[in-house]
Amino acid sequence: MAATTTTVEDLPGDVLACALRRLDGPSLAAASCATAGLRALADDPDTWRALCLSRWPSLAAAAEQRCVLSGAGAVSHRRLFADAFPFPCVDDAAAAAPLDGDDQRLPGELVSAVDVYHGGAAVVSRVVETSTSSSWFLTSPFRVDAVGGKSPAPAAASVASSPAELELSWILLDPSTGRAVNVSSRRAVAVERHWYTGDTLVRYAVVLAGCKFEATVSCSEEAGQITEVSLAADDADGAAVSGEGCLRLLAAAMAGPRKGGRGQEGEAKRRYDEFVRRKRGRKESKARREVLVDLCCSAVSAVAVISFLAAVVLR
């Protein structure tokens, strides 16, 4: 009697679908490449929706507040995962390339889906809608506040003993195109104390085309309560990037390539350290040039004074 071969596709479809729902995103995408049957099961929108909502709880609030993830013209959850899970990769040439139709491709609105994790569980999940079409936004320094002021963190969001272990996801989504990008390094790239308040500042950063998007989580010194979560951007000289400049960077990042796989969090930390080192070097070089200019000005002034005195004495 010939031996029969049993494959994974011999299992009932509902059993396979249940197994696929237990996979993480990269594993699910890899499984979909194995066979046509697994691809059909892995393309199930409900599977990707459950995966996205479990990884980023803030997306549930985004779906309730807007028709970004549901209804007509909704964003595909599989596409959203492909955009937001890997790290963006934008070089200087891509960021400097002109956009077709002037500013028509710049996002007219940004939706921020922010999740702060501690011990693998989300302790803060927020959605922030930012209008980007006003001249005030385009010309002002880019900044988005998810927690702080009128939007405090929940009382349960306390990490008194280990703020450095916090992880952060900050997804910026363009509702008009459905594209998204995650501008957080996930794990902290720097932890420091505020010089005045003593609060712990946990920083997460992604470097895009010579500019740094930096999200900061502030934890109070006494109770370890999360008091502020904000996002800003600056260039290699330490100057704040305008709203329009950030929109151009984000548009290039949303349309550009991504980098996934292991080691990308370490790569984000390495790029951050390199950015800080270059920024410090540029600052020191600028200080040396200013000292040299001051010396030259002092020398010219001294020569002028001596020449004037000599002219008076020898007259």
Image (cartoon, grey):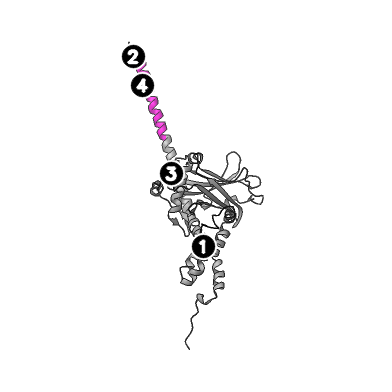
- C-alpha separation, residue under disc 4 versus residue under disc 2: 12 Å
Name the secondary structure under disc 2.
helix
- C-alpha separation, residue under disc 2 versus residue under disc 3: 49 Å
In the image, 50 versus 291, the foreground residue is 50
Residue at point 43% right, 38% down? 284
Q: Residues within 10 Å of mark 2 (few under 14, many from 20)?
A: few
Q: Residues within 10 Å of mark 4 (few under 14, many from 20)?
A: few
Q: Quadrant of the C terminus?
A: top left
Is residue 268 something that shows in the picture?
Answer: yes
**Is 48 left or right of 159, judged from the image as shown?**
left
**Is 234 left or right of 304, judged from the image as shown?**
right
- C-alpha separation, residue under disc 1 versus residue under disc 4: 72 Å
The amino acid pointed to by label 3 is Arg
Is residue 35 something that shows in the picture?
Answer: no
The amino acid pointed to by label 4 is Val
Q: Nearer the viewer, mark 2 or mark 3?
A: 3
The amino acid pointed to by label 1 is Gly
Image quadrant where residue 292 sits: top left
Disc ID at residue 303: 4
Disc ID at residue 25: 1
Q: Are marks 3 and 1 in contact (CB under 8 Å)?
A: no
Q: Residue furthest top?
A: 315
Looking at the image, is mark 3 or mark 4 earlier in the sequence? 3
Disc ID at residue 278: 3
- C-alpha separation, residue under disc 3 versus residue under disc 4: 37 Å
Specify start and end residues of the magenta stretch as a single range. 288-309
Q: Position of residue 31 (x, y in %)?
A: 49, 68
The amino acid pointed to by label 2 is Ala
Compared to residue 285, the image places residue 121 above or below, namely: below
Looking at the image, is mark 1 or mark 4 earlier in the sequence? 1
Q: Residues within 10 Å of mark 1 (few under 14, many from 20)?
A: some
Q: Are marks 1 and 4 in contact (CB under 8 Å)?
A: no
